[in-house]
Amino acid sequence: MALIPTAESSPFFTSFWTQVSCFQLRIEEKSVAIPIPQISGALEFCLSGICINQHLCCFGHSNCKHGHAWEFYCAAFLVHLCINIRCVFTELGGASSLSLLRQWDVVAPSISFSWNASHPTPCSWDGVICEAEFVVSLNLSYYNISGQLGHEIGYLKHLRSVRLTYNKLFGSIPPEVGNCSLLEELWLTGNSFTGELPASLWNLLNLGTLELSGNSLEGNLPNSLCKLEKLWVLGLLGNKLTGMIPNCIWNMTKLKLLDLEGNGLQGMIPTSFPNGSSLMGLSIIGNRFEGPLPPSLCELEELEQLHIASNKLNGTIPDCIWNMSKLGYFDARENGFHGMLPTNFPTLNSWTLIILNDNQFEGPLPSSLCKLENLQYLTLRHNKLAGLCGFPLEDCGASHEGSQPNPSNPQTDEQVDLMNGLTKESVLLGFACGLILGLMGHLMFYTQKPKWFHAWLNVHMNNWCTKRRRL
């Protein structure tokens, strides 16, 4: 970190610790260098060697010449440094944040008011959170920010959380974000970012949440994405990504939520998954996946949501899918599936939603569907199933009224097919769940899911965050 004081600085350098306008700041790895032009033009303080100019004085540095008169000033300066070093880093965060602000054309009034260079610390600024005087979180979602995300974000090396969702940011994601090596969550959902994903993202080895849904990002997903071994949320919905999905992504055992909906990605669902996979939610709606639905999906014991609609999948649905104990939401509409529905649906399963419209299923509609007490949505139209006219489920109670075609109600088809418009408009649900150090924050899926989906997210995010707080 380099500090360049003004000519008004005293020999004891008291002024440039508190005046951010008096110096420029530059981050370096393990040293602090302070050039002072008015003293021999080369005065330098190094934390690694504790040396103030080889020509003037030093402490424990073999190449320095000792000067007793200057050692007193060096000692005094060192004491002052120890007292004020936290202020230096705080000012650094403030200067970098102000540099980000200069890239924004429009901001919320609260930012314009609170982000002020005259403040001694940025820790009181709106949307800024500090830990031990370091800026560790920028939470500026829904602030109507318009402009670009500047490269200065890379100077905030203590950042753990960046949340800039639902603003009007545009341009490319700066590669300097890869300098924030402590970053645990990056939320840029609902902006207008373009270009390819910067390769530096895959160096953020502490990243647990990467949410970039609702932008216009292009290019392929590289194999280096799988270097993010701590990643548990990957949201890329509604971009323009293309190419084959890396096979290694299925081997990321900590990944819980994978949302690739609404891109142009290709590939096949793998025939095997690693032991210990913790995948709970998978959405590949509106891509170009093809081939059969493999029985390997049944190996995902934690899977609760499976959204595979609007692809080129075909074949039959493996019987084991219907027996997955935790699977409650299954959306397989608009594919090429065929075959018959199982005669006996397991009554102990937590089925809430089954969407199978626009396929080639045939045969009778099984009466065992009536025994699924938690079932709220059932969509089967545009298949070759028998018994869909009248009331084939005559034993079903009133709780399944929304799933039964009623000839006297012309709105029934739309009511039963409520989920048909899932991909037409998208909304991101966010949950904030804790402090910045190690807590993963609110989970967002940028897709219009009804209350059952919100409730599912809420339960699991609260449970997950509660466990994190106990650690």
Image (spheres, rainbow, N blue to C red):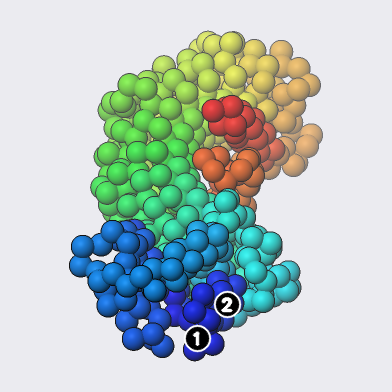
Q: Is residue 303 visible?
A: yes
Q: Is residue 131 left or right of residue 280?
A: right
Residue 390, percent from left and from top? 69, 25
- Which of the two residues, 407 or 469, is positioned nearer the viewer here? 469
Residue picked out by circle 2: 15
Within 10 Å of disc 1 (Cα), the crowding (few <14, some 14-19, many 20+) is some
Residue type at numbered disc 2 = Ser
Q: CA distance from mark 2 to mark 1?
A: 9 Å
Residue type at numbered disc 1 = Thr
Q: Is residue 343 above or below residue 71?
A: above
Q: Quadrant of the N terminus?
A: bottom left
Q: How many marks?
A: 2
Q: Is residue 167 above or below residue 24?
A: above
Q: Is residue 266 above or below residue 295?
A: below
Residue 282, percent from left and from top? 46, 36
Res 276 label: none
Residue pictured at 39% horizontal, 52% vertical: 181
Which of disc 1 and disc 2 is earlier in sequence? 1
Within 10 Å of disc 2 (Cα), the crowding (few <14, some 14-19, many 20+) is some
Q: Is residue 18 left or right of residue 246?
A: right
Res 6 label: 1
- Mark 2–mark 1 contact, CB under 8 Å? yes
Mark 1 residue element: loop
Residue pictured at 78% horizontal, 37% vertical: 409
Q: Is residue 170 visible?
A: no
Residue 273, percent from left and from top? 31, 27
